[in-house]
């Protein structure tokens, strides 16, 4: 192919008759967005928590006296295929609560026998003698029994750190009133009554502790373990009425405000010369506060000192019956407290809820909340929170909570009226200008959360969120 380069051909070529758009843009004012940030989430927990003013930086939760007898979980150490119970963790058993003789605890831990089990294996049979306690190091175990009309009913689902058969250590006539079947393969440690008796016979300190433990039922309690308030009802005539008083915990828990801080740095040249049409310092500050609030919500969920996941009462933690979150699981979570205000779940867990509802031909309703239509169950909104962790095995947790100080629920703690307060409970303090002409601002927020009574918060654990293969 040849190109015609003759003068006539060049005269016929089209010429530009107006200003090009590329050149025109040099004189145009660009329309811009404010700085965007992908980290920003809905932060429903911060929006829904009732915030209580906390003067002095601490909040004390006063409760009625409760007789707590070891309701925590037991932890183990793993050495290759060998699993051992941490001796001190045996203090989580009711009959060893408060016992601190390390030598005796080491002896008991050393007599625990490791046992591997497989999925579907029956570990104990209903009606047979109970002669040992089982400590679950890993795995899921279903407890079932026979109902009033002869059908099989579910009793409980146990998982890592749980145990069953504790009464067998002291009661020679104990028998299993349920059948325990392994849902998954796993490992447990077993301590027999005979081995416990052998250690008990040679440990006077343990004998004294057991004798003291045996007297605990003489202390009158209500079904929640609180010291009973004596009263009489339904009587006639001149009956002598019982005297009563409300006993309190002598060492109530105090929640101290935690802190999240960062130092924002802005060069004076940027603030002076590039402040139009948007204020550079204000935009930097806005995004910094957004990140700080995201961290605040993360801490309210995951902090080991006051985070909701770590501070939920062990009696308020339940396991899913089959893995994925079913309507039955959420109903069991609901029935453990009055006035549940909301469910909180990771978005992937909410998607798993939707799949399970669809598989059963159910369509959960919606609840109007702050002008939004959100997914709900039994009139309780299910709100997303991406701060709830997803475990390596594709499981997560779902929280259910009652809110408010008046309702004995979950509350947020903060202090307002801070020096140079920018938002309630958040301050921005100018720290000066460095020799490099950089301005520094200290951005600080103080916060915590408190669970006023144990049943204010419940957790559905080990919720399978992975999609099942059909």
Image (cartoon, rainbow, N blue to C red):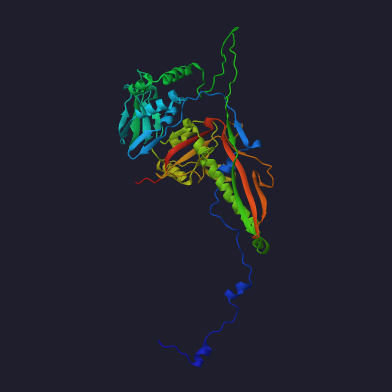
Occupied quadrant, residue 439 = bottom right
On screen, residue 163 above or below 269: above
Residue beneath the point at 61% across and 52% down = 263
Observer able to see residue 378: no
Occupied quadrant, residue 110 = top left
On screen, residue 468 above or below 100: below
Question: 127 or 267, which is in the foreground?
Answer: 267
Residue beneath the point at 42% across and 88% down = 2
Q: Position of residue 461 (x, y in %)?
A: 44, 37
Question: 91 or 396, which is in the foreground?
Answer: 91
On screen, residue 25 above or below 235: below
Observer able to see residue 45: yes
Residue beneath the point at 48% across and 41% down = 364
In the displayed structure, does residue 218 sit left or right of residue 413?
Answer: left
Occupied quadrant, residue 15 = bottom right
On screen, residue 128 above or below 232: below
């Amino acid at each position: 192919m040849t190109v015609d380069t003759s003068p006539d051909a060049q005269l016929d070529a089209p010429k530009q008759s107006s200003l090009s758009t590329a050149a025109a843009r040099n004189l145009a004012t660009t329309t811009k967005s404010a700085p965007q940030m992908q980290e920003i989430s809905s932060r429903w927990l911060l929006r829904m928590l009732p915030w209580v003013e906390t003067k002095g930086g601490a909040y004390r939760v006063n409760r009625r006296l409760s007789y707590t007898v070891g309701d925590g979980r037991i932890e183990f150490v793993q050495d290759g295929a060998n699993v051992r119970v941490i001796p001190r963790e045996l203090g989580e058993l009711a009959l060893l609560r408060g016992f601190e003789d390390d030598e005796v605890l080491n002896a008991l831990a050393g007599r625990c026998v490791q046992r591997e089990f497989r999925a579907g294996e029956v570990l104990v049979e209903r009606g047979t003698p109970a002669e040992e306690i089982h400590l679950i190091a890993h795995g899921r175990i279903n407890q079932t029994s026979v109902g009033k009309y002869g059908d099989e009913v579910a009793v409980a689902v146990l998982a890592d750190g749980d145990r069953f058969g504790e009464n067998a250590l002291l009661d020679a006539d104990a028998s299993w009133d349920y059948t325990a079947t392994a849902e998954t393969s796993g490992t447990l440690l077993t301590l027999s009554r005979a081995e416990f008796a052998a250690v008990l016979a040679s440990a006077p300190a343990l004998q004294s502790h057991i004798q003291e433990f045996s007297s605990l039922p003489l202390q009158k309690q209500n079904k929640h373990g609180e010291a009973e308030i004596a009263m009489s009802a339904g009587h006639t005539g001149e009956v002598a009425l019982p005297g009563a008083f409300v006993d309190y915990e002598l060492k109530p828990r105090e929640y101290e405000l935690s802190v999240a801080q960062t130092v924002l740095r802005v060069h004076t040249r940027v603030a002076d010369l590039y402040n139009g049409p948007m204020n550079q310092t204000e935009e930097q500050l806005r995004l910094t506060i957004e990140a700080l609030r995201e961290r605040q919500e993360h801490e309210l969920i995951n902090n080991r000192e006051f985070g909701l996941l770590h501070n939920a009462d062990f009696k308020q933690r339940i396991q899913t019956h089959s893995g994925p979150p079913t309507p039955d699981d959420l109903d069991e979570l609901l029935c453990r407290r009055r006035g549940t205000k909301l469910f909180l779940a990771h978005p992937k867990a909410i998607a798993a809820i939707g799949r399970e509802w669809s598989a059963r031909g159910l369509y959960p309703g919606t609840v109007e909340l702050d002008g939004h239509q959100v997914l709900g169950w039994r009139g309780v909104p299910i709100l997303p929170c991406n701060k709830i962790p997803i475990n390596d095995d594709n499981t997560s947790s779902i929280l259910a909570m009652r809110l408010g100080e008046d309702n004995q629920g979950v509350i947020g703690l903060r202090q307002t009226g801070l020096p140079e307060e920018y938002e309630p409970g958040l301050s921005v303090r100018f720290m000066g200008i460095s020799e490099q002409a950089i301005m520094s601002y200290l951005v600080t927020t103080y916060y915590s959360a408190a669970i006023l009574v144990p049943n204010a918060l419940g957790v559905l654990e080990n919720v399978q969120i992975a999609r099942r293969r059909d």
